[in-house]
Image (cartoon, rainbow, N blue to C red):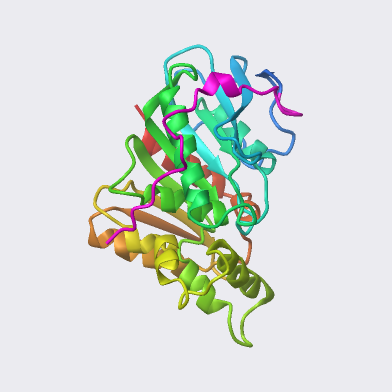
Amino acid sequence: MRTAVGTAAGVGALVLASFLLAPSAGASARVSDPAPNSSASPTPSPSPSPSATTSDVRIRTFAYGTHVRQRMDVWWHETGPRRPAVFVIHGGWWSGGDKKYMTSVSRSFSQLGYTVVNLDYRLSGDAAWPAQRADTLDVIATVRRHAEQFNTDPDRYVLLGFSAGGHLATAAGAYGDGLPGLRGVVGISPVVSPLTAYADGQGDGASLEQRKLRKAAIVLAGGCSPRQCPAVWSSMEVPYHATAGDAPVMTVHSADEFVPPYQSGTLKQALAEVGVPMTVKTMPGTQHSAPLYREPGVADAVQKWVADRLGH
């Protein structure tokens, strides 16, 4: 049984234009130059539009709520057909991180012709779960309501999350019986199972990162353990919420990282039981999150998978 937790108050009431902010530092109104060290260089892989240039791209930062962290950078193409969208969600143990660290990833997908939404969300020190999922859902709803303004297709989008952001992406993808218009979810080292992270982070054999992730999950849950707050931890556990209406999922892990591939294995099994396909790609080594995404072949594989989900 799913836990019915609504999105943040006012999801249907925000008027996006009234929250227009000045462009953030380093994000000009138009973009024409690629990042010098982009983590995902443009490739000839399938594009959602006939022309995947950046000369017509505008970037603006918008507020989707009243909290200082409820901000999103939207990259949109002013010309051509309505573009499918990629929502990018940063990691940071749920307690840190910032959308600015996802600028290169956002630029790479913009150069491929997509609308890109690079979002911040309330951290665990600001609010306990499910505030982070609520913020993710609010961003999606806000952009879909204003799809015409952003020249985007409200019924063709994917979610791309890194580490803790991968947890939010998969949790949003498993919310309810599937989100309208969602075509796929990608997680790079996603913490799809906080309960597994909690178990892996205890005992003398746990690594420093595993112990840190266990503590971070407890903070996300409002400071309580699974025994103390079983309903909260059940709500955080993505495999518990798989339904036939969920979108396909792709995840990438390093074989020996502290968020191991078997976390995604639990979600893959749950999705298989309801008939939803999931791909788990495992790379050698210990790289995690953004460094893993920069490993040879990873970004290309993700871009191809996204294009297959959003293609014409």
Position of 18 relative to 267 (above/below): above
In the depicted structure, whether residue 290 falls above or below residue 183? below
Residue 130 among magenta residues: no
Work out whether residue 194 or residue 307 is closer to the camera in this orientation and state it: 194
Answer above or below: position of 234 versus 89: below
**Left-right relation of 95 to 183:** right
Q: Is residue 200 visible?
A: yes
Between 34 and 1, the residue placed more toward the observer is: 1
Magenta part of the chain: 1-27
Is 159 displayed left or right of 20 in the figure? left
The question of residue 18 being in magenta is answered with yes
Please state, as top left, top right, bottom left or bottom right, where the N terminus lies in the image. Answer: bottom left
What residue sits 51% from the left and 31% below the top? Answer: 44
Q: Is residue 208 left or right of residue 190?
A: right
Residue at (62% x, 15% y) in the render? 55
In the figure, residue 19 lies in which quadrant? Answer: top right
Residue 153 sits in quarter? top left
The reply to whether residue 257 is visible in this rendering is no
| Residue 41 percent across, percent down from the top left | 62, 36
The residue at the point 63 percent across, 23 percent down is: 59
Q: Who's the residue at 53% across and 74% down the image?
A: 198
